[in-house]
Amino acid sequence: MSDVNNPVITSGARKVSGHCLLNGSDVSAALVSFDVTDNGFRGASTFELTLGLSKLPSQLSLQSWWASQTTIKVELTVSITTQAGTSTKRLIIGNIDKYRFCPARFEIVADGRDFAALLIDSKSAGESFKNYEKHHPAFTEEW
């Protein structure tokens, strides 16, 4: 019978770590958790992240900084470290749509979408198609 604690057996454990940039500032130490949903071709991919206030850089932990930002760009990456080495993959880059302070938990929870959302949300000036068939020569009432 083999020993369960046989030191000859090497561990297959791996280390998974997340990294987060807010407007170019590394806030990975404050990253509590994050979730990324890839929607493929159906729309913009989404993310949600939770940041611990006590680990944020001093200028980013103030509510006045968050309130003064017009756009907060987020970049989320994940690194997996095994015995073979470290593999890093960028999961999403986008803007925060909304955030909320949770003072009782000393956290900021934010969610947003990738940059595809900018294309989806943008509208061209004067673009309206509700009366298109009435004005287009290919569509006549004689049809």
Image (tube, rainbow, N blue to C red):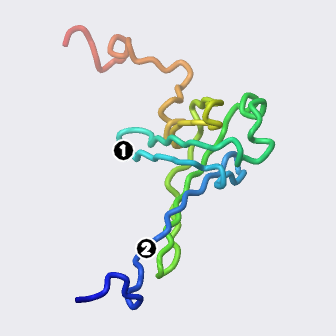
Closest to the observer: 137 or 79? 79
Q: Name the residue under label 2.
A: 13
Name which residue lies at 52% across and 74% down.
86
Q: Residues within 10 Å of mark 1 (few under 14, many from 20)?
A: few
In percent of width and height, residue 61 lies at: 74, 39
Name which residue lies at 74% across and 31% down.
63
Q: In this view, does 1 lie to the left or right of 111?
A: left
Could you give the CA–CA distance between mark 2 and mark 1, rounded to whole angstroms? 35 Å
In percent of width and height, residue 53 lies at: 69, 41
Mark identifier at residue 8: none
Q: Name the residue under label 1.
A: 41
Quarter of the picture containing the N terminus is bottom left
Name which residue lies at 20% across and 9% down.
142
Against 86, residue 53 (above or below) is: above
Question: Are the residues tagged 2 and 1 within 8 Å (C-beta)?
Answer: no
Q: Is residue 65 left or right of residue 31?
A: right
Q: Is mark 1 on a helix, strand or loop?
A: loop
Residue at the bottom extreme, as displayed? 8
Q: Is mark 2 on a helix, strand or loop?
A: loop
Closest to the observer: 130 or 3? 3
Mark nearer the N terminus (2 vs 1): 2
Which is closer to the viewer, label 2 or label 1?
2
In percent of width and height, residue 126 lies at: 53, 18
Q: Which amino acid does label 2 sit on?
A: Ala
